Amino acid sequence: VTRKERLTEIILAADARAAPDVDLASRMPQFIGLADNPGPVLRGLRVAVIGVGSVGGRIALHLARAQVAELILCDRSCFKKESLLTQPMLPEAICELKAGYIGRLCKLISPGTRILVFDGPFEELDAVALAEVDVVFLATDNLAVEVAVGQACKNLGKVLNHASVHGETLVAQVRCFGNTHDDGPCPACGFGADEWRHLHEQTAFKCELTEDGRPVQEIKVQPTVSVSFLCSMAADLAVLQMFRQVLKLGQPVADTLLEYSGFTHRTAPSPLKRNPECPCDHQVWKRMQPPRPLAACGLAELADAAGIANPSFLVDELAFVETASCPCGAKVEVQQFAPVDGPIASCQRCWNGLYADTFKSHRPVAARIAADVLDRPLKDIGAAEARWVVVRNDDRAALFTGPSALAGEGQGGPPPPPPPPPSPVQGEGENGR
Ligand SMILES: [Zn+2]
Ligand SMILES: [Zn+2]
């Protein structure tokens, strides 16, 4: 397991030719059924786009033109010369990393938008990187990323719009996941035997290493075989769905599939349902404020506050370590939280690194294993810097966040922001709450 990565903010060079102040209202239609100008809602919106290639890149550019408050862009790959055929880029960007390039374009179009990028795999981002966004877009052909993003959005209760294309049949699809309750669908609910086999093959290759520690076989994610206009249509439909979600236009689109077929010119919406066979975690974590600053709270206190019995705990990116040992043979009792990789302390005998014992290191940790430390404040058990804690059992889960749980802040960042305003996103039932 690698250390989790933070997002990097795009800052334009002083001589960049960024857009002047443009009034969003000057081209914004007065949508039917909407009393107010949509500007304030759009300008307050924080959105993440996972995968910024032929579909996701265009989604990001649309969002920049809507002057949203914040855009998080994540993609691990760079543009190739073939990208010119389907992706929203110029030849100058060949060999450039996609997230950084699209991020800079978005920043030039909308300098007022805060843009955070990660040029790496979504799985390496902080588990709560999406905690403060309102809407997530997923536009990738990588099944492992689909599962990971679906799971993160489900846990964090985030609206997820999954856009995809099927070139051979001229089909563009958008799946909207409301993620308001545990019984709703996730992207993996729709996987068939082929997808699961594919995914297992990908993960198997990833774990098999050669002698010098490189993957036996590079994971080959097939490039999107499609045409430029079909990719942009999927992006357009996905952003259209988001406008309906955040401005509450027309019928709710939560947990629906919207499909356009170019051979029949039919557009068919249909409901998405949870697949009872889906092996993914469908638990929606309830957001809660800790009763006191997180570092001063004990785990038992948090479980009480959430009313969750027989819980287990996820404490930031930390593992609970019972014992650790050193190659010299020294073994020590730890009973504290510690980072999942690297040495957790120095050996008192030889001063080399002490490493957590694999089978005595837990993430999540069950209450009975951490029983001795449940009443001690987090700051005294190795978790002084913890930004968030999840308390869960099979039935319920709560996510406690401290004031500095936001992604992209970095060390010594700005002062803690005020609590987020109520999400403008529409879900099912009572206004998406
Ligand atoms: Zn599922
Ligand atoms: Zn030692």
Image (tube, rainbow, N blue to C red):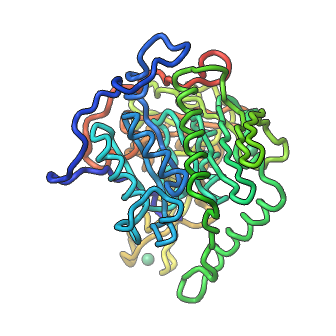
User: Left or right of 210: which side holds 10?
Assistant: left
Residue at position x 40%, y 70% from top?
94
Q: Quadrant of the C terminus?
A: top right
> What is the residue that sits farthest to the front in this orientation?
264
Q: Position of residue 9 (x, y in %)?
A: 31, 50
- Judge whether 219 appears above or below 36 on screen: below
Between 315 and 79, the one nearer to me in the picture: 79
Q: Nearer the viewer, residue 427 or 17?
A: 17
- On screen, residue 7 versus residue 178, left or right, reads left
In this view, the residue in front, 37 or 339, is: 37
**Residue located farthest toward the top when viewing the structure as drawn:** 35
Task: Give x and y (percent) for residue 379.
Answer: 39, 42
Q: Is residue 210 left or right of residue 14?
A: right
Residue 40, horizontal then vertical, whole percent: 38, 22
Ligand 2 shows up in the quarter that is: bottom left
Extreme residue toward the bottom, this view: 211
Can see residue 380? no
Q: Residue at x 71, y 50 (%)?
A: 171
Is 240 situated above or below 380? above
- Residue at horizontal 29%, vertical 49%? 411
The answer to whether residue 84 is visible is: yes
**Quadrant of residue 235 in the image?**
top right
Question: How far from the left and from the top, in percent, is residue 412?
Answer: 25, 46
Quadrant where the N terminus lies?
A: bottom right
Which residue is pictured at 27% across the width and 32% down the height?
22
Q: Is residue 70 left or right of residue 33?
A: left
